[in-house]
Amino acid sequence: KKPGAYFFGRYYRMAGPKELQLFLDDPERFAPLEPRKLLPAPNRRAHRRTEAEAKPMFPKPIEFASYCSATYLDGGKRYECLVLGQQEFAVEYRDKLYFLLNEEAREKFM
């Protein structure tokens, strides 16, 4: 039977006594209490696009019908919070183009 140890309500099996001792010496090294926040892969991240960078992307459709999704979400998804985004605050995310109202909205989107 392989050795193991309980750590914060979870049981961890080890390959052998040497690995068990390594785990017991520093369990958080192998089983961190806080989940690690990993950045998504570069092709899955949002990227700021200047107006000059966004123009050649046309005729790619603008997502959310060119409305600012950050303003809409902040406004509780109400109709009156639909505001057209500006080309100068463009963001490319997962190969899609979004226009945001201003730099503050673009920061929230990022």
Image (cartoon, helix red, strand yellow):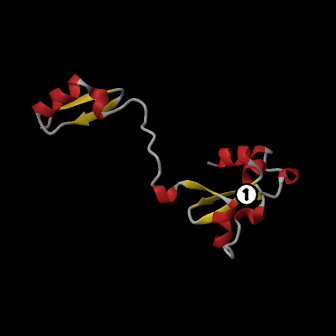
Residue 20 located left or right of residue 56: left
* The one of 83 and 72 positioned closer to us in this rendering: 83
Q: Position of residue 58 (x, y in %)?
A: 68, 74
Find the residue positioned furthest to the right: 80
The quadrant where residue 18 appears: top left
* The one of 56 and 93 positioned closer to us in this rendering: 56
Relative vertical location of residue 88 with respect to residue 75 in this rendering, above or below: below
Residue 82 located left or right of residue 22: right
In the picture of the structure, the residue carrying the numbered disc 1 is: 88
Q: Position of residue 36 (x, y in %)?
A: 42, 38
The quadrant where residue 79 appears: bottom right
- Number of marks in picture: 1
Q: Check disc 1 and give the amino acid type.
A: Glu
Find the residue positioned furthest to the bottom: 59
Where does the N terminus fall, quadrant-wise? top left
Q: Residue at x 36, y 32 (%)?
A: 32
* The one of 83 and 24 positioned closer to us in this rendering: 83
Relative vertical location of residue 24 with respect to residue 56 in this rendering, above or below: above
Find the residue positioned furthest to the top: 25
Q: Position of residue 65 (x, y in %)?
A: 76, 65
Q: Residue at x 43, y 36 (%)?
A: 35
Around disc 1, counting alpha carbons within 10 Å, would you say few (fewer than 14), some (14 to 19), or many (20 or more)?
some
Q: Position of residue 22 (x, y in %)?
A: 18, 29
Residue 68 located left or right of residue 7: right
Q: Residue at x 71, y 67 (%)?
A: 62
State the SS at label 1.
strand
Q: Residue at x 26, y 35 (%)?
A: 12
